[in-house]
Amino acid sequence: MLEQLQCVGCGRELIHIGSGAEPERCEDCIPQTGAGSPLHEQVVANLRRLRRDAGLSLDALAERAAIRASDVSRLERWVAGEPGVTKALRLAHALGVPIDALVERVYWDRGEIAASPGKRRSPAERLSGFFHVLPSNVPIFEPAPPQLIGCRKEVAQIVGQNVRMARERRHRTQVELAEAAGLSKSGLSLIERGIHETTLGTLLSIARSLEVTPGFLFGGLAWTPQSIVRLSTCRGAHRHSGGDLDGPIERMWGEGKTARQIGEALGIPTGSVSAIVHRLRERGAGLQHRRRPTSPSQRQARCRRRDCQPAKGDCSDEEPNAIDPQRRRAAHADVGARIGSNLKCHRLRAGLTFRQLGEATETDHTFLYRIEKRGHTPQLSLIVKLAGSLNVPCESIASGIVWEPAEQTFFLASSDCEPGPPAARLGQNVLSARRRLGISQQALADRASMSRSDVVDFERGKRNFRLLAVTRLAGALEADFDELFAGVVSWYVRPLPPSEYAHGDMPPSKTERDAMLVRLWREGKSEREIAEALELSVAAVGPYVRELRDAGRRLPYRRPPRGVVERSARRRRAMQSSGAQTRG
């Protein structure tokens, strides 16, 4: 049943169907930030969920964040206003999460950024930005149905389809995406058509330019470990099939027999017994060592086979609990100065001026200057706008700022504006997943149909692998791509806009687009109007018209010829068009 209501802000009539809460304001009167905005409600919902997941009460969270309990209560009851960045950092680090967790499912879609805002004809030509709050029941990216792949061609086709779909839904041309990702237009076209299987580094560059996760571009790929076919390692008069001797050798080794005794019992050389024992150890068999290691490489190999943890001392060179030597206590002014230095670093990397960044965030550029130069601390909503406009996570704006609940103070740690190599982080994720399964590098190589040297290089981040290798490792580790790429994404991720065509519908064909352009041109529409109707750039309308004229279409000219060459070209097109009509 329809109910007629009125907006409390402007008095406009609202239509309410009768299901759910009654709307109080129209879309134009709903604030973007502050109390009552969707952003504020989502931040409050995230804070309440994170506090419950951490098992903390209001008083305990207030004590850890050094904030009054009444302020935390007012924030959770949607009474308090929007928190500043320092309060948001205290709450997030007191809960043991990054600041991105407080603004989860809140995204900033920036508007157009002009190279020179003064060259616009009118302010109405600019597309403004807006906050996009995604409901909790809506996935950020639609999961694709998995398909078992078996060759590089299938991987290239599925990834190419995902890249093309993401590019079209971002409303970007191949030229724009290729320029942003550092590729050529022909190279990007080969990737989208599934002809070329690109490398992991190139795909990460494309994902950064499209502001999507690598897991989305890998969507639909699935790999199942194949049956392992072992080749025989034994040579001599009595040849055995690979794997026939594994069971007897493992049993007799466990009984305490020597390699010579095992070789005499099975009729094989002693060296073959040692080689099979080594191979079984590499694949995860717990065969005991009978002598102490004689070199550091043997000691490291034994630690690797035992899947030792870094805390066990000599098994790893890493120091997980090492203290940053540049770590120092920070006052409020130091926190603002660090945010300003991070902002300057990312702004220069993005190649934006203060005016351009202010236009992207819809903020006065003088205030951005005060943040960067004078250490002013912004609100949480402006942090989201800056992250979305600079294509970095929110945590990057506050990088190097740590709140210690035990000492009730901020610390400044070393901060690197340049993100680490993604291959190294991806290799660490593979190493962690392998240790969680309790398998060796050789066992993982067997399951992924790869060589052990490839697995070693992947875990160390030494090579730029093809996409098939990443798919095989994900299937062998029984991990999804989002888990495999955790911590690799160093750019801003936001949902894709919905597809313009429903499932089963087809975009307009080339013939339909040609007919539409001919009709609009003959009606006297401007090139800008034609570009908007055909979703083209204004510069692409002229070549499109010339292409149709060369094909024999009669499109009227809107200006006289400017030279002899142009006059002869028009005469040639007219003669071709007349000949085509005569033959018809």
Image: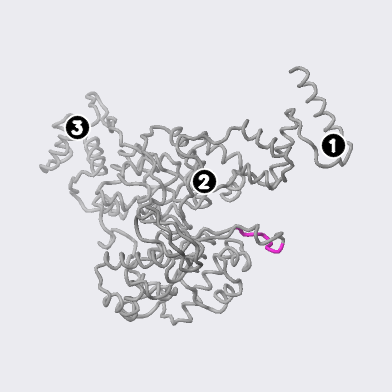
Distance (Cα) linking label 1 and label 3: 83 Å
- Whether the magenta-drawn stretch holds residue 114 is answered as yes
Instruction: Decide: is 512 above or below 439.
Output: above
Closer to the chain start, of discs 1 and 2, is 2
Q: At label 3, which amino acid type do we have?
A: Leu
Instruction: Provide the residue span drawn in magenta.
Output: 112-118
Q: Is residue 337 left or right of residue 312?
A: right
In this orientation, which residue lies closer to the viewer: 498 or 143?
A: 498
Name of the residue lying farthest toward the right: 564
* Secondary structure category for the residue under label 3: loop
* Secondary structure category for the residue under label 2: helix
Closer to the chain start, of discs 1 and 3, is 3
* Secondary structure category for the residue under label 1: helix
Tell whether label 3 touches label 2 (CB within 8 Å). Answer: no
Q: Position of residue 492 (x, y in %)?
A: 48, 58
Q: At label 1, which amino acid type do we have?
A: Glu
Camera-near label (1 vs 3) is 1
Instruction: Decide: is 240 above or below 76.
Output: above
Question: Most prominent secondary structure in the magenta stretch?
Answer: loop
Which residue, given by chain and number where applicable, does mark 3 sit on? 245
Which residue, given by chain and number where applicable, does mark 1 sit on? 566
Q: Quadrant of residue 168?
A: top right
Distance (Cα) linking label 2 and label 3: 57 Å
- Whether the magenta-drawn stretch holds residue 236 is answered as no
Residue shown at 80% from the left, 38% from the top = 557
Residue shown at 54% from the left, 36% from the top = 507
Q: Quadrant of residue 410?
A: bottom left
Question: How many numbered discs, if any?
Answer: 3
Q: At label 2, which amino acid type do we have?
A: Arg
Which residue, given by chain and number where applicable, does mark 2 sit on? 169
